[in-house]
Amino acid sequence: MADKKGNPGGIAAGQLRSIIERIERLEEEKTALSADIREIYAEAKANGFDAKAMRQIVRIRKLEPTERQEQEAIIDLYMHALGMAE
């Protein structure tokens, strides 16, 4: 079945192709950015920094202050329950 413009299945092929190509370009950029980030972590590690700790800090900094405080409180509670806190 075709739409009024003769597109099979009623799909605007040109628009679909454009969207797919934009996604592909963004995926390529994302891959390049990921490689750049890995290089920065490698550089930090070479300079004596702990990459795991840095990744965790980056993750924490993305949180809203109240969300971060809530998460820290839960972790503290769990650590006390497991006898891991002082």
Image: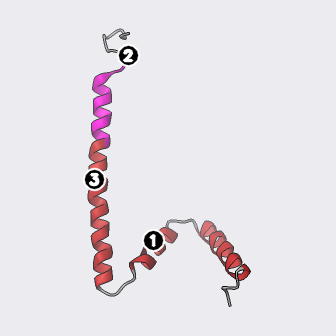
Structural crowding at the residue carrying mark 2, measured as other residues with C-alpha within 10 Å and reported as few (<14), some (14–19) or many (≥20): few
Residue 58 image point, x, y percent: 45, 71
Q: Identify residue type, mark 3.
A: Glu
Residue 86 image point, x, y percent: 68, 91
Q: Which mark is residue 29?
A: 3
Residue at 50% across / 66% down in the picture?
62
* Viewer-side residue, 80 vs 69: 80
User: Picture quarter containing residue 68?
Assistant: bottom right
Q: Identify residue type, mark 2.
A: Gly
In the picture of the structure, the residue carrying the numbered disc 1 is: 58
In the picture of the structure, the residue carrying the numbered disc 2 is: 9
Secondary element type, mark 1: helix
Residue 21's place in the image compared with 50, above or below, is: above
Contact? badges 3 and 2 (CB < 8 Å): no
Residue 84's place in the image compared with 42, above or below, is: below
Q: Sequence-wise, which precedes: disc 3 or disc 1?
A: 3
Residue at 32% across / 34% down in the picture?
19
Q: Sequence-wise, which precedes: disc 3 or disc 2?
A: 2
Q: Sequence-wise, which precedes: disc 1 or disc 2?
A: 2
